[in-house]
Image (cartoon, coloured by chain):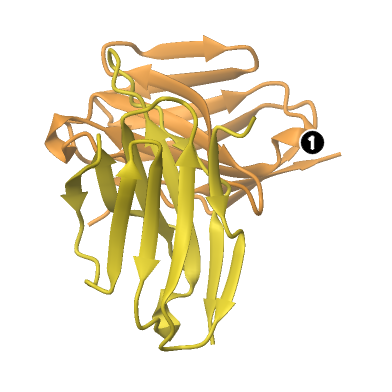
Chain colours: A yellow, B orange
Amino acid sequence: DTAVSQTPKYLVTQMGNDKSIKCEQNLGHDTMYWYKQDSKKFLKIMFSYNNKELIINETVPNRFSPKSPDKAHLNLHINSLELGDSAVYFCASKGTNAYQETQYFGPGTRLLVL
Amino acid sequence: DQQVKQNSPSLSVQEGRISILNCDYTNSMFDYFLWYKKYPAEGPTFLISISSIKDKNEDGRFTVFLNKSAKHLSLHIVPSQPGDSAVYFCAAVGMDSNYQLIWGAGTKLIIKP
């Protein structure tokens, strides 16, 4: 059983399109994240959700919108895709029992905007 | 401003020898540190962590050392195996970072047979 899964794994699309990336975790965690790994391989946090509520929204363009239908899912919608959006996007989740800082990551979604 | 730095983009080590990966941080409010390992085309996986109240944590072949006065931590892998070839990320977290993980840029470890 995959703990954190993302779909699709690869996404190639044209500039200006709207796309979504889905994330699901079966760990029973309360907190989920979206990260973007840029060309320099830095992992930058984009959003964090705790029990379906947004608790962190880093300075990302408002073309990016996270949506959490329930605490096991955190989807990322991207409108009007731009070339600079090409990157690997990782979903992660974290428990909130005791002092649990370990985040569990999905396999990543490789987005290429042409 | 990078609060967590991994100054070596890559490291090459002979199989069987010790691999030492280094990480420096600038924020003295960090109170928990983690190492993640990442293979190509996969997400990062948790490897080992250490609380700021400790100076050493060991798990099998992996040991993390923390030197708070120097704001430095290191990951030791001994003996190194071919399957250890991956990118290793250092991350730190604390109340000051609102408990967000602050990541280093990663070090690519290559184990030579």
Measured as percent of width and height from the top left, residue A73 is found at 40, 43
Q: Secondary structure at mark 1?
A: helix
Which residue type does callout 1 highlight? Pro
Give neighbour class at mark 1: few <14, some 14-19, many 20+ (Cα, 10 Å).
Answer: some
Quarter holding residue A103: top left
x and y percentages locating residue B39 in the rendered image? 65, 46
Query: Residue at left 31%, top 34%?
Result: A31
Q: How many marks?
A: 1
Which residue is rendered at x = 25% and y = 34% of the image?
A51
Residue under the point 41% across and 25% down? A28
Q: Residue at x 23, y 24 (%)?
A: B31
- Horizontal side, residue B41 vs residue B113: left or right: left
**Residue A92 showing in the rendered view:** yes
Vertical position of residue A73 compared to residue A111: above or below: above
Front position in the image: B39 or A30: A30
Quadrant of the frame with the N terminus of chain A? top right
Q: Position of residue B109 (x, y in %)?
A: 64, 44
Query: Mark 1 = which residue?
Result: B82
Q: Is residue B3 visible?
A: no
The quadrant of the picture occupied by the C terminus of chain A is bottom right
Residue A42 vs residue A25, the one in the foreground: A25
Q: Position of residue A19 (x, y in %)?
A: 45, 72
B75 versus B90 height, above or below: above
Q: Quadrant of residue B69?
A: top left
Using the image, name the chain to which the residue with label 1 belongs.
B
